[in-house]
Amino acid sequence: EVQLVESGGGLVQPGRSLRLSCAASGFTFDDYAMHWVRQAPGKGLEWVSGISWNGGVIGYADSVKGRFTISRDSAKNSLYMEMDSLRPEDTALYYCAKDAHYAITGHGMDVWGQGTTVTVSS
Amino acid sequence: DIQMTQSPSSLSASVGDRVTITCRASQDIKTYLGWYQQKPGKSPKRLIYAASSLQGGVPSRFGGGGSGTEFTLTISSLQPEDFATYYCVQHNSYPLTFGGGTKVEIK
């Protein structure tokens, strides 16, 4: 069974950093692109970032570009998001999602984790 | 960036009704579009990929159509378990962009 388990969320002050992790199992992690998608309380879905199967192609939403860094570790079957200079508007439930293909465009996200909550507040 | 305009933002319908949700892209995205269902407190679930292909395990009452800039999600006969929020997303180019969502409520 394909499974994605996010962790690392929590309460953090504005301007501080946080690192999210996503542990993947049940599929060949190296074969697929991966994404982070977030959902602010009571709001819709927002794509945050995606990384291709080998890390060669990376994309970010304008709202996080320059502050967030996505990465992956094939040895640990894990996806990461390093979030710096956090702002109150980054408060959201962050989902890890598997792509149906090796590229970050063209096929879409087919499996999602349960999410981890990030709250940015003083 | 490609903008996705989804309509309506909400609708009320009865069990058995036929429901259609529309998504409009600000530029040609061919058929690089997916539809997702999200129930309260749950993760999104993919229903449709490549604009019109049904995800495995999804009931056949769900159907997708369109290409280019105009897309639809149709539920042919609404069931009690279909009351949820639906999102479209384009994956033609990044940043990937979602529609604003359509909340389907019980009339």
Image: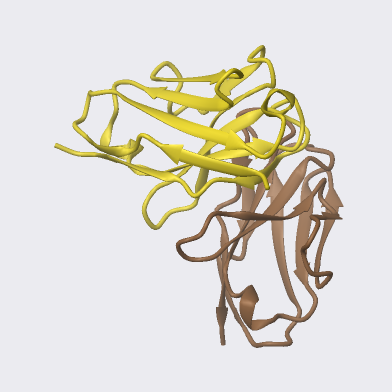
Chain colours: A yellow, B brown
Residue drawn at x 42%, y 16% is A66
Q: Quadrant of the C terminus of chain A?
A: top left
Pick the front one: A19 or B8: A19
As drawn, B83 above or below A18: below
Q: Residue at position x 65%, y 45% from top? A: A111
**Where's residue A22, x and y in %?**
50, 33
Outermost residue, top side: A56
Numbered circles on residues, count: 0
Q: Would you place residue B21 above or below residue A39 in this image?
A: below
Question: Relative to residue A61, is residue B86 drawn left or right?
Answer: right
| Picture layout, residue B61 above or below residue B22 | below
- Residue A51 or B74: which is nearer the viewer? A51
The one of A5 and B63 positioned closer to us in this rendering = A5
Q: Is residue A15 found left or right of A28 in the rendered image? A: left
What residue is rendered at 67% in x and 40% in y? A26
State the residue at coordinates (57%, 58%): B101
Point out residue A95 in the picture as x, y percentages from the top left corner: 50, 42
Q: Where residue A7 sits: x, y (%)?
A: 40, 37
Q: Residue B10, how many percent across, how many down?
A: 55, 70
Point out the residue furthest to the left here: A122
Q: Is residue A39 left or right of residue A88?
A: right
